[in-house]
Image (cartoon, rainbow, N blue to C red):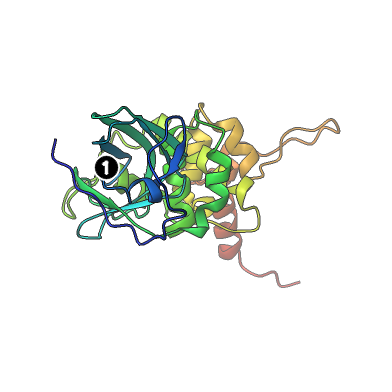
Amino acid sequence: MSAIRPTLALAVLCALGGLTRGADLPLTAALARSALQATWTGNGRDQLSLAITNTSATPASVAIPAGLIAADHAGGNRLIVLRAAQLTIPAGTTAEVALPAAALSAKNAPAAQRYRATADTEPRLGALLKFLADKPDIPRPTAQLTALAFVEDVTFAQWQLFLAPRRADEPPDPTRPTPLEVTQAIDALGLLRTLAPEKTFALATDAELKLRALRNPWCRTKAVQLYGITLPTSDGAVPPDLGQLLHLKPGDNCPICRQRAEMLTPASDF
């Protein structure tokens, strides 16, 4: 396997006299050793892999930190590692680890290519990385959308283009979004409300997402809570039905229809 050793613009944390069995080397320190050679590959979206060849006579164990950012060699695509990982490389062999990663831009091109580690950081994702540290079961699309909301405040339409990019003259796919994709978006909105309750995100005011979520039985209950729709109470108060909340058809007595009716009603002479 051919390998390229990336140049890291980070200071080596300490001088290491040799590779010791059982010690987790910080990634920057490990890759400063000539005995360890790394190859990074990614797809611009949700895949980032690190392969390390250990040419020394002793095994090595390397710690990959959450928050590490890798970029393709043109610099246009950047991926961030979402959770810390550890890679053990026996002497004289190559080992590889697939890292949980997310794109740092909705404009990332979906292409498999070589990457390089960078010294970049993304402080806006600090709360998300801390939250994900002990939650490996969070669906990757949900984590990805949450990350894009923090760094680019994407809309639901932009998220759909990220999931299924198309030409400018190509019509939207009528089968998208799927109920699962809508549910993942609502889960991402829930994460955003938890991690940054003081912020207003485009997803929270996206009319299309709200409409689809309230129609979707997979996530309707959670959507009702997130959008602050009042549920029946013990005092007998009953919330308006969906037709009164959303403009689904002419004359459905939704807020839009009621406001239009009020505008058309002539002023009283009295």
Say left or right for 253 vs 8: right
Q: Residues within 10 Å of mark 1 (few under 14, many from 20)?
A: some
As rendered, which of 2 and 176 lies closer to the eye? 2
Which residue does the image show at 75% across and 32% down from the upper left?
232
Q: Which residue is mark 1?
A: 35
Q: Quadrant of residue 181?
A: top left
Which residue does the image show at 34% across and 45% down from the upper left?
160
From this viewpoint, is residue 157 visible? no
Q: Amino acid at mark 1?
A: Ala
Name of the residue lying farthest toward the left: 2
Residue 242 % position (x, y): 58, 37
Number of marks in picture: 1
Which residue does the image show at 25% across and 43% down from the upper left?
37
Query: Which corner quadrant holds the N terminus?
Result: top left
From this viewpoint, is residue 96 visible? yes
Q: Quadrant of residue 26?
A: top left
Query: Which corner quadrant holds the C terminus?
Result: bottom right
**264 is higher (above) or lower (below) than 160:** below
